[in-house]
Amino acid sequence: MSGLTLKGLRKAYGAAQVIKGVDLEILPEEFVVFVGPSGCGKSTLLRMIAGLESISGGDLFIGGRRVNDVDASQRGIAMVFQSYALYPHMTVRENMGFALKFAGASKTEITAKVDAAAAILGLGALMDRKPRDLSGGQRQRVAIGRAIVREPQVFLFDEPLSNLDAELRVHMRIEIARLHQDLKATIIYVTHDQIEAMTLADKIVVLREGRVEQTGSPLKLYDDPDNIFVAGFIGSPKMNFLSARVQGGRLVLPELADQSLPLPALQQALPEGAQVTLGLRPDVFKRGGSASLSLTIEIVEQLGGETFAYARVGGSAQIMTIAVEDGRALRPGQALVASFDPARALLFDTDGQRLR
C-alpha cells in the first residue's frame, strides 16, 4: 500500500476558493478520516485525490509519484461512494468482477480475485443474487468488494454508511475496521459523523471552510484540541462552553450566576479581567472533584448504561450537559452539584484558540 502527500493543495471554482492550501501526510496502511461540517470541503478534497476534480494549485503525490495530471484510472485508487452504484441487471459476482473484465483480465484471474474478496466480506452465499435481492448493508459490502478486487494502492470511502440505519451503521463500522486490519490498506474515509471518525481512524483530519484545523489521533483531538471549533466538533455529547473572566486568581462565570472556579494551571499567566471561554466535557464530572457547579436539572436522558443530565442555573439560558454516575434516580427539578477536577478544564482565548 502507498502513502500520500498533499502540498498546498487548492481548489477554486472561478473566484470561489473551496480548498485553501491543504498540507497533509498520509502514511502507508494508515486509516485517515476527513471530518467537518457540511460544506467544509471534505468530499471535494477526496474527489481531488481520486482524480474526479481537477487541482487548481499545489501538488498531490501517491506513492511518491506526482499525480496532478494523471487520469483517475491510472492513480491506483478505488472509491466507494455513498450510493452503492451497482448494476441492477448484474449478479453480485458480475458486479464485483466488472472492472476486471473491462480491463481485459482473464476469467481465471477474475474468478480468483472475486472469490477472495467475497470470502473477506462474507458474500459467498450471495454471489448469484442481484442488487434488488440484497439488504442495504449487503449492497454496501458488494460495493466494497468491487473496490477490493482492483487491488488499489489507496481506498477512498465517501460517506459510505450514511444510507444505512443505525444498527447497520454500527455493524458496517466493525466490518470496515476488520477490513483495514486484514488488508493492511491505506484508507481515506470521509464522514460528517464524528463517532465514525473516533471509532475507525488512526488519524483524524478536521476541516473547516477548506482548511485543516487540526490533525491527530482520535484521543489526541478529544483530549487536546487546538481551538474551540475542534473542541466542539469532536465528542458526543459536545463540550460545554461557558464565558468566564479572570478575577482574583479564579474564573468567574457570569452565565452561571457569577459562580467561580479555580483557574486551571497554564504555561502563560492571564491578566486580571481577561475574558476567556471555559470548556468542560460532559464526562469530566466525577464525585470528589475539587471544583463544582451548582445547577438545577431540566431534563434527564437515561441511556441504560449511562445517564446525562441537562441542567441550568436558575433562570439562565445556559444549559450544561453532565454525565452523571449512578444517575438513575435523578428527576427534573432536582438540585445537582456537579464536581470535577479543574485540571481537566480547557480554556480558549477570545479568538477561539486554546490557552495552554
Image (cartoon, rainbow, N blue to C red):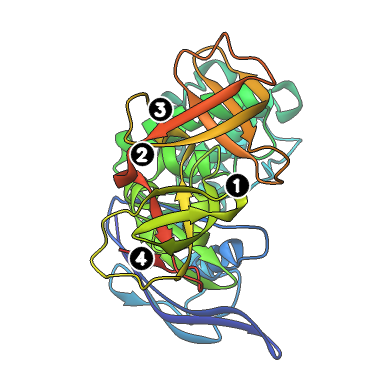
Say whether disc 2 or disc 3 marks the residue closer to the N-terminus. 3
Residue linked to disc 2: 180
**Considering the image in quadrants, where does the C terminus appear?**
bottom left
- Left or right: 244 in relation to 249: right
**Marks 3, 1: nearer the viewer:** 1
Q: Up-down: is 101 above or below 70? A: above
Q: Residues within 10 Å of mark 3 (few under 14, many from 20)?
A: some
Q: Is residue 348 at least partly visible in the picture?
A: yes
**Marks 4, 3: nearer the viewer:** 4
Per the model, the C-alpha gap separating discs 4 and 2 is: 36 Å
Say whether disc 4 or disc 3 marks the residue closer to the N-terminus. 3
Q: Residue at x 37, y 61 (%)?
A: 248
Q: Nearer the viewer, residue 220 or 153?
A: 220
Q: Secondary structure at mark 4?
A: strand
**Marks 4, 2: nearer the viewer:** 4
Q: Position of residue 262 (x, y in %)?
A: 35, 49
Say whether disc 2 or disc 1 marks the residue closer to the N-terminus. 2
Say whether disc 4 or disc 2 marks the residue closer to the N-terminus. 2
Q: Position of residue 150 (x, y in %)?
A: 44, 49
Q: Residues within 10 Å of mark 2 (few under 14, many from 20)?
A: some
Q: Which mark is residue 257?
A: 1
